Image (tube, rainbow, N blue to C red):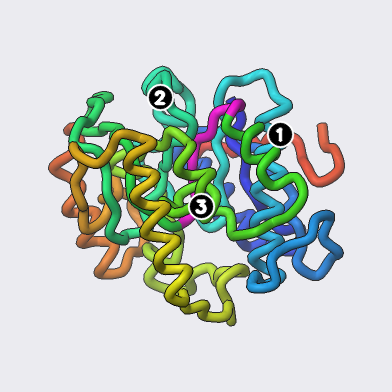
Amino acid sequence: MNCLVINLDRSVDRLAHITSEFAKIGVAFERVSAVDASHEFPLPASPHLTKSQIACSLSHRKCWQIIADGADQYGTVFEDDAVFSSDAGRFLSDYSWVPVDADIVKLETFFEKTRIGNRQIEIGNGYAVARLVGSHSGTAGYLISRSAARKLLHHTRRRISGVADHFLFDATCLTCILSRNYQLTPAICTQAQFVHLQSPLATLIQINAPHWTKGPIAKIRSEFMKAFGHCWNGTLWGTRKVGFITLGQLSPGPRNEFSACVCDAARPLLAGGATQGRTAPHSPQLPG
């Protein structure tokens, strides 16, 4: 199965970062050239989106296309500022742990409140997967089935109406409601902004993004869609709110106080040939 990494051609520092992260866990990846916000877009988009947000969604769409056209049942998509836990390699080299009915499994934590199912499927070494019922921001790392990728491509074939995590992990979005989503817990990756103590990788998407406040009608619609989602997925009961999804233990490296606290909370859960816009798989040299 492919591990696809979205990376702008001009973001050499971020490519070096993600290459190092994959080397730590012993997994090869394939670089996908990100859509540049300074170029013309192939699809129209909603006016409330910034050019960087549109480019990000289109970049994820390129990955969905690769997975939809591929032979594997699943693919994984990562952004180039992802940071992996030390156990991440086992989940990216063997997919027997993925629930048979899963459309998408979120591998990342954004350290925000969400809602998951009470019933968890234990998959060993303190890890489990549970239904992801609430919204959970971020697209730094997720697994997606070939059939789900095809559905998302169909949904976005005419227009980009939102950011990538809106389609994937927003509980008020129809594409998310109709998808069978799971959360890996503890998570095996997060964004570098939550982890690095010094010189964090600056995000290329959210800088100067306008703040959009929901009006009364939008709020009513959101609540209606949440209720519809619970009815559709049978999740009116048997779920629980969590303060945040914990992160698996990181490999040694600089961490800020918040990420160190999160990792401490997760420890009890752990056991003792190039084409256009796409390059050949990277096989990083492993240390030692």
Q: Is residue 165 left or right of residue 273?
A: left
Mark 3, Cα crowd under 10 Å, few <14 / some 14-19 / many 20+, is many
- Which residue appears at 57% of the width and 52% of the height? 79
Please name the residue shown 25% across and 69% down the image. 257
Question: Is residue 120 or residue 197 the one in the foreground?
Answer: 120
Per the rendered image, the range of residues in magenta is: 138-147
Asked if the stretch drawn in magenta spans residue 140, the answer is yes
**How far separated are the C-alphas under marks 1 and 2?**
20 Å
Res. 98 image quadrant: top left
Quadrant assignment, res 132: top left
Q: Find out whether residue 80 is within the magenta segment.
A: no
Q: Nearer the viewer, residue 43 or 126?
A: 43
- Residue behind mark 3: 139
What x and y, as percent, mark residue 246? 26, 50
Q: Residue at x 27, y 49 (%)?
A: 115
> Circle 3 — which element?
loop
Q: Where is residue 194, by image quadrant?
A: bottom left
Q: Quote the CA–CA distance across marks 1 and 3.
A: 17 Å
Question: Taking 101 as reference, is 153 left or right?
Answer: right
Name the element at disc 2: loop
Instruction: Find residue 98 and name its label.
Output: 2
Residue 254: image location, x then y, percent: 36, 63
